[in-house]
Amino acid sequence: SDWASGQRFQKPMTQNWESLYQNLNTMATPDEQNQKLELSGNHDSTQVRQIGLRYILVQSEDGIFLLHQYRAHARILLEDFEKSLAESPQGSQQELFPTTIDLSSQDAALMSSVAPTLETIGFQIELFGQNSFIVRGIPASCLELNIEDTLLGFVNDLKDNKPSGEEQLKDRIIKSMAQQTAIKSGRALKAQEMLAMFRNLMRCKQPQYDLNGKPTFVLLNSGTLDKLFEA
């Protein structure tokens, strides 16, 4: 079967998914902000499926979520990176075969200037020679990466838009890196990866929007379907 079973949804904040979705577009009280949507239990009540290697369908007793996998993962990574900067450095996953990247002198200087921030969010990068770097580890929250393409894209993105202030620069670094490392469309995901992405997205502070304010998911339940099919 194309469907894979997951875990039952628990609804600590609302009585139904329609009110949850409506509440995502309003300001929550401090108490509400501390509550998280959790998945728990071993009941065969949640199913997931990838559509077009771009979207994730999550079906439960309460409704259907359609996630944009790239936007959702970018949101998750951004908030992970923010937490690493604010609280403690993120763990790294070691590369079996370290990657060497050769840069121009200008790009190498840029990479050296942002390396401490990259290390805080989980990259292990060492200067190797004059304009080369060895990458020995990547953030634990990132899945398989083409490290060279990721870092070259990051450098090109940053040098075109590098803020002057230290805090603004850190914000720009983690936003750019979240965009570069997020799962792109066209990649097949396993059922547990899809479930983990959904669970992690719903634990985010702003799960409904990506880094550019675009929606990360839509929700279809009996209420929204009734409206769609009204005569």
Image (cartoon, rainbow, N blue to C red):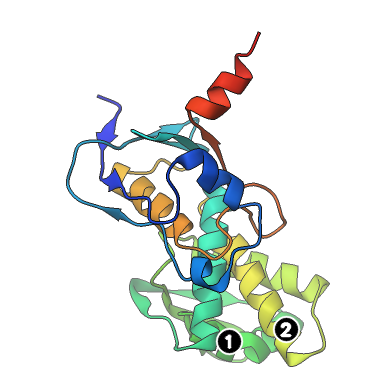
Coordinates of residue 156 in the picture (x, y in percent): 73, 69
Residue labelled with disc 1? 117
Residue 182 in view of the camera:
no
Mark found first going from the N terminus, 2 or 1? 1
In the image, is 124 to the left or to the right of 148?
A: left
Q: Quadrant of residue 108?
A: bottom right
In the image, is 108 to the left or to the right of 67?
A: right
Instruction: Tell me the quarter of the image containing the N terminus.
Output: top left
Q: Classify mark 2: helix, strand or loop.
A: helix
Q: Are marks 2 and 1 in contact (CB under 8 Å)?
A: yes
Q: Amino acid at mark 1?
A: Thr
Residue 189 in view of the camera:
yes
Q: Quadrant of residue 149?
A: bottom right
Query: Residue at position x 79%, y 90% from top?
Result: 165
Q: Which is more toward the observer, 149 or 212? A: 212
Q: Which is more toward the observer, 171 or 201? A: 201
- Where residue 169 is drawn, which disc sits there? 2
Q: Which is more toward the observer, 100 or 90? A: 90
Q: Is residue 228 above or below residue 83?
A: above
Coordinates of residue 15 in the picture (x, y in percent): 42, 45
Query: Residue at position x 18%, y 41% from top?
Result: 43
Q: Is residue 79 above or below residue 223?
A: below
Coordinates of residue 157 in the picture (x, y in percent): 73, 68
Separation (CA) of disc 2 from disc 1:
10 Å
Q: Classify mark 1: helix, strand or loop.
A: helix
Q: Is residue 2 above or below residue 31?
A: above
Q: Amino acid at mark 2?
A: Leu
In the image, is 110 to the left or to the right of 81?
A: right
